[in-house]
Image (spheres, grey):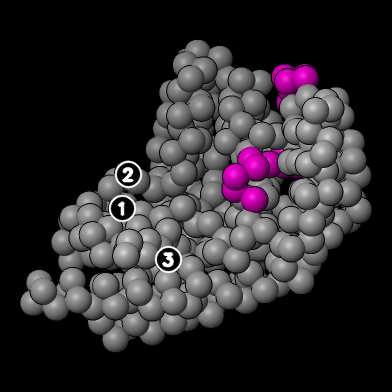
Amino acid sequence: MSKTTYRLHYNENPLGPSPVVMDRIRDHLAGLSLYPHRDDEALRDCLAAFYGRGVTPAHLFSTYSGSEALDLIARVYLEPGDEVIVCGPTFHVYARTAEWQGAKIVDVPLDNQDFSVRVDAVMRAVTPRTRLVYVGNPNNPTGSIVTRDDMDLLHMGLPDQVTLISDEVYHHFVTRPDYPDSLASVAAGRNLIVLHSFSKVYGLAGLRVGVAISRPDIIDRLARYRRTFHLGTLEMEAAIAAVGDPDHVARSVAMAERGKKRCYAAFDRLRITYWPSEGNFILFRTPMFADDLAARMADRGILVGSGSRFGLTHAIRVSIGLPEANQAFISALEHILADES
């Protein structure tokens, strides 16, 4: 009998897509021989009605994943020799897409205690060649957020030639009351691009649907680079159906919150340092090299994310799974630590 493998390394939704989404996909399978709509008007209309708060279809543009949105942003804004600011440890695609355009990456590391953004340090790093500042909110892999006050300081302090990119693909999982309302900032006309995704709480990572939210003039610049038929029929229909099932989102968020609390309790009992997370994952400190612990976890059928890819040689990011997956992770960690003692 094959060993069960638990995927706790990609921050996926273990509940999968909503049943409503699966029904919508099945309803459209017979039409796969037909080309999809040339634009994303139906999805933008749906999202504008869902978001409210002054967001209109003109504030929205869908992409083939959040990573494609980052690529489009870099292509629109950057030329060789321009500079972008990232706050590591963070999602590597920010730097990668900027480097493809010949930009210089300026890393302003997060605070080494709580992984908060050091706003003053970001401001000091800005030069006349700075074009973009990227923040993950919540940040991957730390689970930390940029607070409302810090986001306001960034908006007020960054010069006009600098556009702030707020990657909020995990925003559904946030519980802190000081999380900023970025959509209201977009509607107010701030120099801001917000990224959302259907890969996380909606459970549609395999269909690759992202959304860029910004001022209409910025969206127009991004949309000029779109491919013909840039979203397929199933992607479009699945995304629209997902927005229409808030109960599935609520179940997914509640499951992640319960799973985090269970893992926190286990870490406390095992005296393992961890950072409370506003995502559907947790970063924790490891007593051995992260790659070694991840390999030993994999031998037990538990796939976790080594922090070494983020420069964190003694940290692991573990996604929250179904209860049995969380328990399997905790049990494996207990056994590995016992073997080391």
Residue 42's quadrant in the figure? Answer: top right
Residue bearing mark 3: 282
Which residues make up the magenta segment? 204-228
> x and y percent of residue 202 in the render?
67, 57
**Image coords of residue 54 (percent x, y):** 90, 51
Secondary structure state at the residue bearing disc 2:
helix
Label 1 – label 2 distance at C-alpha: 7 Å
Q: Is residue 250 among the parts visible in the rendering?
A: yes
The residue to which callout 2 is attached is: 309
Q: CA distance from mark 3 to mark 2?
A: 16 Å
Q: Give the mark nearer the N terminus: 3 vs 2.
A: 3
- SS at mark 1 in the image: strand
Q: Is 98 colored magenta in this rendering?
A: no
Q: For the residues labelled 1 and 2, say whether their Cβ atoms are less than 8 Å apart.
A: yes
Where does residue 294 sit, x and y in percent of width and height? 26, 57
Amino acid type of the residue that numbered disc 1 sits on in the rendered structure: Ser
> Which residue is at a point 80% across and 28% down the rendered structure image?
33
Determine if the magenta segment contains residue 211.
yes
Q: Amino acid at mark 2?
A: Arg
Residue 31 or residue 145, whichever sits in front: 31
Which residue is at a point 77% across and 48% down the rendered structure image?
A: 25
Secondary element type, mark 3: strand
Check disc 3 and give the amino acid type.
Answer: Ile
User: Which residue lies under the disc numbered 1?
Assistant: 306
Residue pictured at 14% horizontal, 78% vertical: 338
Mark 1: few/some/many CA within 10 Å (<14, 14-19, 20+): many
- The outermost residue toward the front is 1
Pointer 1 and pointer 3: residues touching (CB < 8 Å)? no
Left or right: residue 15 compared with residue 63:
left
Residue 304 is left or right of residue 21, and the answer is left
- Nearest to the observer: residue 167 or residue 334: 334
Identity of the residue drawn at 8% across and 77% down: 341
